[in-house]
Image: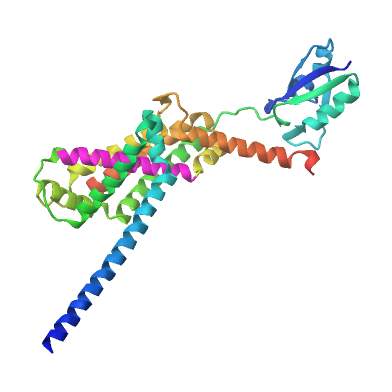
């Protein structure tokens, strides 16, 4: 009777440099068969010059190869259908200069946009009128409303993103982290489609 | 003869009034629907509910948005004064700021610039520092405008 082997492809892996990709690099293997070790050491893919820094290995190719090497085993796939391998993309330290420039761009950019926004909605006039409604006195520069408003702006953004520098207020992910996650998923989906040789 | 002119002018006034009511009502409907749609798209209310874990009170929040909008309408169309101290202004300004801050944050988030920017310069881990640039930029920009720029 054929023994069942369950394979679960790893979704995303980083490799520094490897000519041979073994099964255990790209998948978790579960089986009652004695061949588990051999299975895990099986080479499923050889890197060639043409391969760029992203390779997608489709589960079909893996099972196809394993079927030839182990004709007496039956394979069952669970989980993702392909593995994305990124080669030689070690996390490099971001340059302090670039980060500082970005920081200043964002800082000045947001400062300017908020000023333009205030002009666009005539906030000064509204605040002057509000000052008159509340206190009964005319005041061209109602600082009592404007300064707390300015700090409130920052507090509102902190609340929305749920972060003060590295510290977070509660354990829920912030909308930005969700957005980063979604973006990564989109990149992965793109890679699984366009880097997959079976789709060419 | 005079009667007829009087009656005809009365009819005209009534017709114009009815027209104004129709225009006002439809304008209000469009603006109100648009405003609520805008708030919904930005997702500030769900975000606040998520932060405070108060999903049960969603009806109260809805009522709050409606009453708040109507109160704003009242304030912009009347000319009364309440003769209150500056303390009220302080509280009002602070809450106004928090709301606009959340609006601005939600807009920046909808634009989706951040994930791409962070990936380009390779600071996925330190994303929050970029966020702080946004926050301080808003505070300083706003303070600069009110304290120095408008003089």
* In the depicted structure, whether residue A52 falls above or below residue A136: above
Q: Residue at x 37, y 43 (%)?
A: B103
In this rendering, position of residue B82 left or right of residue A154: left
State the residue in front, A121 or B79: B79
Q: Residue at x 79, y 17 (%)?
A: A40
Quarter holding residue B76: bottom left
Let me know if residue B139 appears in the view: no
Write down the region rendered in magenta.
B88-111
Q: Residue furthest top?
A: A34
State the residue in front, B7 or A170: B7
Q: Residue furthest bottom?
A: B1
Place of residue A122 in the rendered image (x, y in percent of width and height, measured from the top left):
27, 55
Quarter holding residue B78: bottom left
Place of residue B119 in the rendered image (x, y in percent of width and height, measured from the top left):
56, 37
* In the depicted structure, whether residue A177 falls above or below residue B22: above
In this rendering, position of residue B120 left or right of residue A5: left
Place of residue B82 in the rendered image (x, y in percent of width and height, measured from the top left):
10, 46
* In the depicted structure, whether residue A193 falls above or below residue B3: above
In this rendering, position of residue A127 left or right of residue B47: left
Q: How is the image coloured?
A: rainbow
Quarter holding residue B11: bottom left
Is B91 inside the magenta-drawn segment?
Answer: yes
Quadrant of the frame with the N terminus of chain A: top right
Let me know if residue B1 appears in the view: yes
State the residue in front, B147 or B48: B48
Quadrant of the frame with the C terminus of chain A: top right
Q: Residue at x 81, y 18 (%)?
A: A4
Is A154 inside the magenta-drawn segment?
Answer: no
Q: Main secondary structure of the magenta part?
A: helix
Place of residue A186 in the rendered image (x, y in percent of width and height, measured from the top left):
62, 39
State the residue in front, A28 or B101: A28
């Amino acid at each position: 009777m054929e023994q069942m082997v369950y394979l679960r492809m790893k979704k995303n892996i980083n490799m520094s440099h490897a000519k041979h990709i073994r099964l255990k690099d790209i998948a978790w293997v579960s089986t009652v068969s004695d061949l588990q070790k051999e299975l895990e050491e099986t080479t499923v893919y050889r890197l060639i010059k043409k391969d760029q820094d992203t390779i997608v290995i489709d589960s079909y190719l893996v099972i196809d190869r394993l079927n030839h090497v182990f004709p007496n085993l039956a394979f069952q796939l669970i989980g993702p259908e392909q593995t994305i391998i990124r080669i030689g993309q070690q996390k490099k330290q971001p340059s302090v200069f670039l980060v500082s420039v970005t920081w200043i761009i964002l800082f000045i950019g947001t400062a300017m946009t908020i000023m333009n926004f205030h002009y666009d909605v005539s906030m000064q006039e509204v605040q002057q009128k509000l000052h008159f409604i509340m206190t009964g006195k005319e005041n061209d520069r109602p600082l009592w409303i404007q300064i707390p408003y300015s700090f409130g702006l920052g507090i509102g953004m902190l609340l929305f993103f749920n972060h003060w520098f590295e510290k977070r207020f509660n354990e829920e992910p912030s909308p930005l982290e969700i957005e980063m996650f979604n973006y990564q998923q989109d990149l992965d989906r793109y890679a699984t489609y366009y880097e997959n040789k079976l789709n060419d | 003869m005079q009667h007829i002119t009087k009656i005809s002018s009365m009819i005209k006034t009534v017709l114009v009034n009815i027209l104004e009511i129709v225009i006002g009502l439809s304008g209000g409907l469009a603006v109100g629907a648009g405003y609520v749609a805008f708030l919904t798209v930005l997702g500030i209310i769900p975000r606040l509910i998520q932060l405070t874990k108060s999903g049960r009170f969603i009806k109260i929040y809805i009522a709050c948005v409606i009453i708040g909008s109507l109160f704003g309408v009242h304030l912009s169309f009347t000319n009364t004064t309440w003769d209150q101290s500056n303390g009220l202004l302080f509280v009002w300004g602070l809450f106004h700021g928090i709301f606009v801050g959340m609006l601005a944050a939600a807009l920046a988030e909808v634009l989706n610039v951040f994930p791409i920017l962070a990936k380009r310069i390779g600071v996925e881990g330190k994303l929050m520092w970029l966020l702080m640039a946004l926050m301080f930029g808003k505070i300083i920009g706003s303070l600069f405008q009110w304290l120095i720029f408008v003089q």
